[in-house]
Image (cartoon, helix red, strand yellow):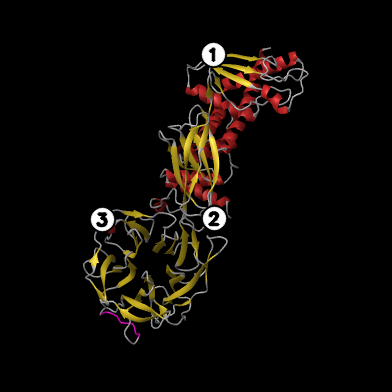
Amino acid sequence: MKKNIIFAILALSSTFIFAQKKVADKFFKNYAYVKASDLYEEAVKKGDSSAHVLTRLGDCYYNNSNSEKASIWYAEAIKKYDDVDPIYYYKYAQSLRSLGEYEEAVVYLEKFNAVQSNEDRIDGTDFTNVALYEKLKSTEGVYVDLVNLPINTKNSDFGGFENDGTFYFASTSKKDRENLYAWNNEPYLDIYESQISESSDNENVTDYSYPNYVKSEGINTKYHEASVAITKDGKTMYFTRDNVSNNKKLKADKKGTAHLKIYKATLIDSVWQDVKELSINDRVFSTGHPALSPDNKTLYFTSDREGGFGQTDIWKVAILGDDNYGFPVNLGAAVNTSGKEMFPFVDEDETLYFSSDSYINLGFLDIFKSNVLKGGTTVENLGAPFNSGYDDFAFNINAEKGRGYLSSNREGGMGSDDIYSFEICYQLIKGTVRDSKTALPLALSTVQLIDETGKVIEETMVGEDGMYSFRVKCNATVNVLGSKADYKDDLQVVNTTLANGAELMVDLNLIPLIDGSEIKLAPIFFDFDKWDIRTDAAYELENIVDVMREHPEMNIDIESHTDSRGPDNYNLTLSDKRAKSTRDYIISRGIDASRIKSANGFGETQLINDCSNGVKCTKEQHQANRRSVFKHDLK
């Protein structure tokens, strides 16, 4: 007899472990990672340490950016199972890198690389260089995809600049291979142009015509021309050129160095001509990379002239008109360092963008922004994806179009330098979290923004007005999950549009679980003639568990009811078994048995409509009588 009881207990325990895992999977699927992790951990405590449970536990914490706990469960899975999915080597390594444990991370990145020869996550990267990880960082909440332009070549292409439907850039694409620039053994640069056309059926598709030399008289020579800036009226172009004499020969200083100069050209009859050298140039230092202020009254540029802070600095000069310019002024220590500051760009709100090999840097030249032109002193690294471990420079953006360009020699490009375009298109998802019964705002509710992969991107707690807002990427699918103690979660799937700056209203209506003297749940379903707790029933019963944990002084009564179909005594017995099975599930989740005052079945004795024996009713009417009632004594 004792052996039978033990077997029965083991069977019941196994049933609950299996049920909890299935319920946890359901919560995981619905992005409720805290609840899922609770259930998975409970399953582990009861003996289920399968690879599925351990890795899912890791995923719960990984998707919530809890790298410490994620690494614990991934380590447990990897060390226990030799055939674990290789993706968990990578996720484990990612968690370790987040914790700064780079040497250990490299071990698992190497394991991942060894078994995933067709994976491109770390293909071609120096992932064994521990020192490199000290410099790397990621930028959360940035929804920007860089596009390598089809006009790039195998050599250097950079400095893309868009003006009134024409795209200007520097390239070596049509130069011969005889006159090479010794620095990189590539041809010298010229300025090219390409016509931009927008697709009529999809505004995210941009086409660039086959590039040709810029239409000009005297801009391109057999030496370098690059880095274009054009006035708002489209009539004046500033560009960089090697120091070339009037007869188009390279001129050098006494040390044999040919420096850069800034020139300007005027658009006459659709042709750039009347090329003139600016008075701020000199043959003993370089002046290049021109950029204009929003009012076109100031020219910003790069120079290694005397009076600077480092190798190259950002300077400015007033444009006085009639080919006259003020005295060049260094932007100062708020921007310039002992290293290289180059490629300035100023947007419409006077934010300065520039490249530098100093500051907190991902490697080589990075793109930064500064509020120095507005009286500030801050410099901020734009981070990934704008920056990489390579040279990233020549950044500019058209705020009205939401489109910009940068240049980089990062891996994956077509040439030594490539031009990348990017679209910055954000929308605002906003709404109010309300009580579905009263329609009143629910203060202190939690709202999570979750991406398509299931990762929590952002989380906020609403105030008294119940309002929340998230900035999201255009043309994307995200999930918004609202939750609060004593309420059922509300999960909304949101598809953003292509309209930049649009606002999407997504209200969240949380259903109160405590309603008067009862705890309200969705119907608890059982299979025909069964009283086992199904996965969908357990999913609902977890709401009871949550409420009772939230209110440790609460006690409940469980009532189970059937419809009138079937023999009266049979219905009474079946409903009683279902009530007690419900009770046992709640107890299995750690709720003290003494808090469940009763668990009784009432069969068909308490119908809530007229569908008694012999009365013809619809399926919906019968369903209304098949119910479970949870009464509480909370005051």
Where's residue 606, x and y in %? Answer: 67, 15
Residue at the spot of label 1: 594
Amino acid of disc 2: Asp
Q: Residue at x 48, y 76 (%)?
A: 173
Please state, as top left, top right, bottom left or bottom right, where the N terminus lies in the image. Answer: top right
Dominant secondary structure (helix, strand or loop) of the stretch shown in magenta: loop
One can see residue 391 in this view: no
The boundaries of the magenta stretch are 248-253
Disc 3 to disc 2: CB gap under 8 Å: no
Horizontally, is 324 left or right of 268 in the view?
Answer: left
* Location of residue 463 (image quadrant): top left
Q: In the rendered image, which residue does mark 3 sit on?
A: 375
Q: Earlier in the sequence, mark 1 or mark 3?
A: 3
Say which residue label 2 marks: 120
* Left or right of residue 240, residue 603 in this image: right
Residue 249: say if magenta: yes
Can residue 395 be seen from the camera position used here?
Answer: yes
Q: Residue 616's spot in the image, x, y percent? A: 77, 23
Q: Position of residue 366 (x, y in %)?
A: 37, 59
What's the amino acid at mark 1?
Answer: Ser
82 drawn magenta: no
Rendered position, 251 above or below 31: below
